[in-house]
Image (spheres, helix red, strand yellow):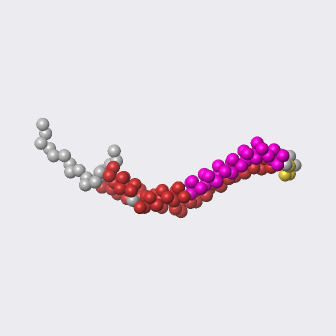
Amino acid sequence: MSTDTPASAPSESTADRYLAVQRSDEFAGLRRALRGFIFPMTVAFFLWYALYVILSAYARGFMGTKVIGNINVALVFGLLQFVSTFAIAWLYSRFANRRIDPVADRIRAEMGEVTHEHGPRG
């Protein structure tokens, strides 16, 4: 049996610190900002996609209308699905760089300081 005393335990465990951060106003604001972008953009994209599918199924005359040469409205709408996907990705990247990443980096830095004070992560 050893008489060695264990190293002093940190005043606050890492798990407790993560819970404290999760409950913080800064983290709540981060989640609110993220949801404020993602949910409306997701709904808008699904509505746009549903419009394309519904028009393709029920408005064949309209979708078959020639725009230029053999290019019809359906093809234009289909290509615009790709354009809108890339546009949303670009908008999210800009949004995250301005609103999400700075706050997340601050929180991560605070957590890193706490983790380094109490030893390596495990």
Q: Could you say which quadrant of the image residue 88 lies in?
A: bottom right
Question: At 53% across and 62% down in the image, what residue appears?
Answer: 98
Q: Could you say which quadrant of the image residue 58 lies in?
A: top right
Q: Could you say which quadrant of the image residue 11 lies in?
A: bottom left
**Residue 111's x, y, as percent?**
37, 55
Q: Nearer the viewer, residue 32 or 121?
A: 32
Q: Nearer the viewer, residue 9 or 42?
A: 42
Q: Is residue 40 magenta?
A: yes
Confirm whether residue 72 shows in the render: no
Question: At 21% across and 51% down in the image, what residue appears?
Answer: 8
- Position of 44 with respect to 7 (left or right) is right
**Residue 15's x, y, as percent?**
33, 49
| 96 up-or-down from 79: above or below | below
Question: At 59% across and 56% down in the image, what residue appears?
Answer: 40
Q: Is residue 46 magenta?
A: yes
The magenta span reads 37-63
Q: Nearer the viewer, residue 2 or 69?
A: 69
**Outermost residue toward the front?**
58
Confirm whether residue 1 shows in the render: yes
- Position of 47 with respect to 95 (left or right) is right
- Position of 69 with respect to 43 (left or right) is right
Question: At 36% across and 52% down in the image, what residue appears?
Answer: 18
- Position of 89 with respect to 62 (left or right) is left
- Position of the N terminus, as image quadrant, is top left
Majority SS type along the magenta span? helix
